[in-house]
Image (cartoon, rainbow, N blue to C red):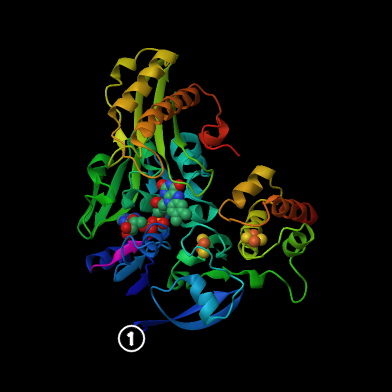
Amino acid sequence: MTLTIASSIDDIIAALAAGARPIAGGTDLVVGSRQGKGSLPDSLIAIDRVEALGVIDRGDAETRLGAGVTHARLMTEPTIVDHFTAIADAAALVGSPATRNVGTVGGNVMNGSPAMDTGSPLVVLGAQAELTNASGSRLVSLDELWVGPGTTSAAPDELCTALVIPNMGEGGGSAYVRLEYRRAMEIAIVGAAAAVTLDGDNVRSIRVALTAVAPTILEVTGLDDLVGKPLDDDALSAVAAAASEQASPISDLRASDRYRRHTIGVMARRAADAAARRASGEDISVPVNRALGVGATA
Amino acid sequence: MSNTSNLNAVELTVNGVPYPVAIETSRNLSGVLRDELGLTGTKEGCDDCECGACMVLLDGQPINSCSYLAVQAQGREITTVEGLAEGDDLHPLQRNILAAGGVQCGFCTPGMLMSATALLERNPDPSQDEIKIGLSGNLCRCTGYAKILDAVSNTAVELR
Ligand SMILES: Cc1cc2nc3c(=O)[nH]c(=O)nc-3n(C[C@H](O)[C@H](O)[C@H](O)COP(=O)(O)OP(=O)(O)OC[C@H]3O[C@@H](n4cnc5c(N)ncnc54)[C@H](O)[C@@H]3O)c2cc1C
Ligand code: FES
Ligand code: FES
């Protein structure tokens, strides 16, 4: 087994073409291998020192979020906290400070777990993954990228170089909440993200996506009826009902399917409410879980 | 067991001292620190990224060394609990955790100290909540945590 430390994207692309697997923070890859979920690949290329992967670049129409940006940065970088708040809400809940220091958004997305916390925020914000190999880069929707638990449609020689996210217009807000039993070192029992834009008091657009209730992150459909009206209690109840109905949760030792189906509705309602409140200018600090006492209490 | 052709000659910088080592790629950092370098202050509790007993600093930031490949740490500054004291003078955090009664069996203590060191470096005036978040990756089965939190607050006051 070998590990090479890359200093450029070209180094990484060449190594992947020769059969190496990327390692960023290793918080999924190394931990998984130690837990016996799989053995470490024979050839690893460490991508954590390539500065180009750590860039957050806000352009006029869209923001490029480097795949190597760590959760610790996602939860504190003003560009993310101010404009893509749901991602910061999610990153702030990941593991512990040690997990967040080395764990990256690219690793979270490419690991493909249905419980990944940055997944539903990225979906509601309309992010696409930029995948790069020796023949160039392509953008894929996250829906196409995630094909099942722990599986992506990316080719083995493709590096995720960035997440490309359209900038939200004025009057936009987003939030991510998750149900958890502990405040740290926890994996989502269920989680929900919402992005809402408002015209005055009325909804201009709303997207809601769900974490840990389906084989991949699941976007809620059928919310178009909510457009043009205030996101009042009835509208939030409709969000909750749609989320519970569309979820297809499993039972495991952490929660039953019935409990997950019920609580995903509660989380979706809270996420939509917090996103709308942020959209209307209310300052709800990151993460929403702590600001609103949504998750585990101290 | 180890096949010499699989050994990598790397240099790890620990507490400012460069250590040349020959290790397999799959070796975790905590194991190398303990078994190759004899720096047994770093503990292995769960060996599975859950308990924080193995916490060390990598370029000043805490990581779970049980689940970090040692070869990936080459070229970076590793700080372990052995790097906190200056000669016989304990680091203020070490002094305060003893004074507050925040050490019982002591198994979690090195990890707690490393997380707390990074926290105070980043945030010299942490709130109680910020201290709890800073130590949220460290489990203690003995003390009930209160005295450890006190030791961190007391140190913050002392260092300001
Ligand atoms: C204690 C602990 C707590 C955790 N808590 C949470 C949590 O609360 N929420 C959560 O969502 N996750 C959690 N995780 C999982 C993990 O920390 C995250 O998924 C993290 O974002 C993974 O990033 P990484 O850089 O460490 O990935 P790595 O482990 O380095 O890589 C993960 C996978 O992605 C591939 N990969 C990495 N980067 C790229 C890239 N740029 N292009 C292509 N492929 C790539 C790797 O080959 C590997 O298959 C936790 C993990 C631990 C150990
Ligand atoms: S030994 Fe590393 S977290 Fe427990
Ligand atoms: S003092 Fe025993 S584990 Fe903390």
In reply to whether residue A20 is colored magenta, the answer given is yes
Instruction: Out of B107 and A30, give the one closest to the viewer.
Output: B107
- Letter of the chain that mark 1 sits on in the rendering: B
Q: The magenta stretch spans which residues? A: A19-23
Residue A172 sits above or below residue A210 on the image: above
Quarter of the image where the N terminus of chain A is located: bottom left
Does the beta carbon at disc 1 come under 8 Å from ligand 1?
A: no
Quadrant in the rendering for residue A28: bottom left
Quadrant in the rendering for residue B37: bottom right
In reply to whether residue B13 is colored magenta, the answer given is no
Measured from the top left, where is residue A27 in percent x and y?
Answer: 42, 58
A38 to the left or right of B21? left
Residue A78 visible at all = yes
Instruction: Out of A249 and B89, give the one closest to the viewer.
Output: A249
B81 to the left or right of A248? right
What SS does tag 1 mark?
A: helix
Instruction: Out of A112 and A227, give the one closest to the viewer.
Output: A112
- Please tell me how crowded label 1 is: few (under 14), some (14-19), or many (20+) other residues with Cα within 10 Å: few
Residue A205 visible at all = no
Quarter of the image where the C terminus of chain A is located: top right
Residue at screen point 27% across, 63% down? A13
Residue A285 sits above or below residue B62 on the image: above
Residue at screen point 67% across, 52% down? B145
Residue B44 sits above or below residue A144 on the image: below
Instruction: Out of B136 and A120, give the one closest to the viewer.
Output: B136
Which residue carries the number 1 mark? B5
What kind of residue is marked 1? Ser
Measured from the top left, where is residue B108 in percent x and y?
Answer: 62, 62
Measured from the top left, where is residue A92 in percent x and y?
Answer: 51, 44
Q: Main secondary structure of the magenta part?
A: strand
Measured from the top left, where is residue B142 in percent x and y?
Answer: 65, 57
Residue at screen point 53% across, 47% down? A184
